[in-house]
Amino acid sequence: MADELVNVNEFKELAREALPKMYFDFYAGGADDEYSLRENVEAFHRIMFRPRILRDVSRIDMSTAVLGYNISAPILIAPTAMHKLAHLDARAAAACNTIMVLSFMSTCTVEEVASSCNAVRFFQLYVYKRRDITSLMVQRAERNGYKAIVLTVDVPRLGRREADIKNKMIAPQLKNFEGLLSTEVVNDKGSNLEAFASGTLDASLCWKDIEWLRSVTNLPILIKGVLTREDAIKAVEAGVNGIIVSNHGARQLDYVPATISVLEEIVQAVRGKLPVLVDGGIRRGTDIFKALALGAHAVLVGRPVIYGLAAKGEYGVRRVIKMLQDELELTMALAGCPTIKDITRNHVKMGHERLNSML
C-alpha cells in the first residue's frame, strides 16, 4: 500500500487506521474551533507562483545549511511529543541527510536517540517550574552531542484541545524524567495531559530568562513560537541564534494567523541578522518553495512525519521526506531555480497582491 502512495497527505488515513483513536486525535487535532489548524494548510493555497523560463535547470541543487550544518534539502524533522519511536525519526533523518529536533516530551531518552544513529540532532526545550530539571535536560543534551537548543515559548499553559478532553488523554511516563518527575496525575475532568502541563510548565518564563538559559549551555539557541515582528525584534535583541515561526501546529491559541502568512513580516523584522525557519501546514514541495521565497532558511515538518512513522515506521518517515524532496526539486525546475539561492520573493505572489493587481 505504501508503494502506491503518491503524496504525504495519503499517509494520514493509514495513520488513522494504525493508531488508537486517543493518539491519532492527539496528533491530528488543534485548539478550540481548529480554525488556525485549517488555515495553516489553506494559506499556502492562496500563494501563486511566478515561474521564470529558459533557465538552465538540468541540475537542481537543494542543499543548504542550518547553523552551519549541511543538509541535503531545507527540510527538518520537527519535534513531536510522546511517541515511542523517536530513534526511528533520528535514523530516517540520518538516511535523508537532514536534522531532527527531538521533543522534550519524547518517550525515548536523550541518550537512546543519540546512540541510535549519527544524525545531526537539535533538542527542543520547555522550561519547567523546577528549573533544575530543565537545566539537567539541557546538560544531558549537550553531553550527548545535540547541536542546538530549540526553546519553545508559546506554551505558558496548554491550549484547549477538545479532542484530548473528550478522550481523557493520558500523559505517559516519560523516560527522560524517570527519577525526577512523575507524569501520573489524577484528573476526572478531562485531559490528564493538560493537568500535567499545568502543574509543571513555568508560566513566568519571559525574555530575561534567555540569559539564564545561556548560563547553563554553550549551545546555540533557537526560539520557537514567534508570530509577530515585535517579538522577532525582541528575539534579535535577546541574542538568540535563530527564530522558528510557529503557532505550535495550531494547538495552542486558535485564530492566530497561519505561519506562512506572517513569515515575511518576521523575515523583514530581523533584517538578515539571524536565520528564520518556519513550520505549520507544510504538505507539499510547493509549500516549501513558497516558504523559501518568502525568506525562510528552511522548514520543519511535523504531522506528516508522525503519520509516516505510524503507518510504516522508519520507512514511512523516509518516504515522507523523500516525497517532499522530490516535489521541491520538481518545483524548482519548473520555476526556473537551479539552486536554493535562486529562489526569490519575485517567484511568488500573495493572495492580497493578486487582489490589488485587479483593482
Image (spheres, rainbow, N blue to C red):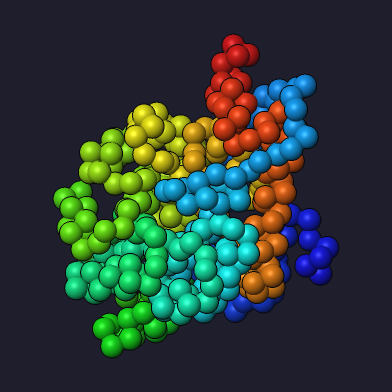
Residue 150 in the image: above or below residue 47:
below
Q: Residue at x 55, y 37 (%)?
A: 292
- Whole-percent x, y for residue 285 in the image: 66, 45
Q: Is residue 78 visible?
A: yes
Q: In this rendering, would 120 be left or right of 128?
A: right
Residue sticking out furthest to the top:
359
Quadrant for residue 287, please give it. top right
- Whole-percent x, y for residue 252 in the image: 40, 56
Q: Nearer the viewer, residue 258 or 138?
A: 138
Q: In this rendering, would 97 be left or right of 177?
A: right
Q: Nearer the viewer, residue 168 or 28?
A: 28
Residue 136 in the image: above or below residue 247:
below
Q: Is residue 12 visible?
A: no
Q: In this rendering, would 327 be left or right of 176?
A: right
Q: Residue at x 71, y 28 (%)?
A: 336
Report the quarter where the N terminus lies. bottom right
Residue 181 in the image: above or below residue 216:
below
Residue 22 in the image: above or below residue 39:
below
Report the quarter where the C terminus lies. top right
- Whole-percent x, y for residue 277 in the image: 46, 45
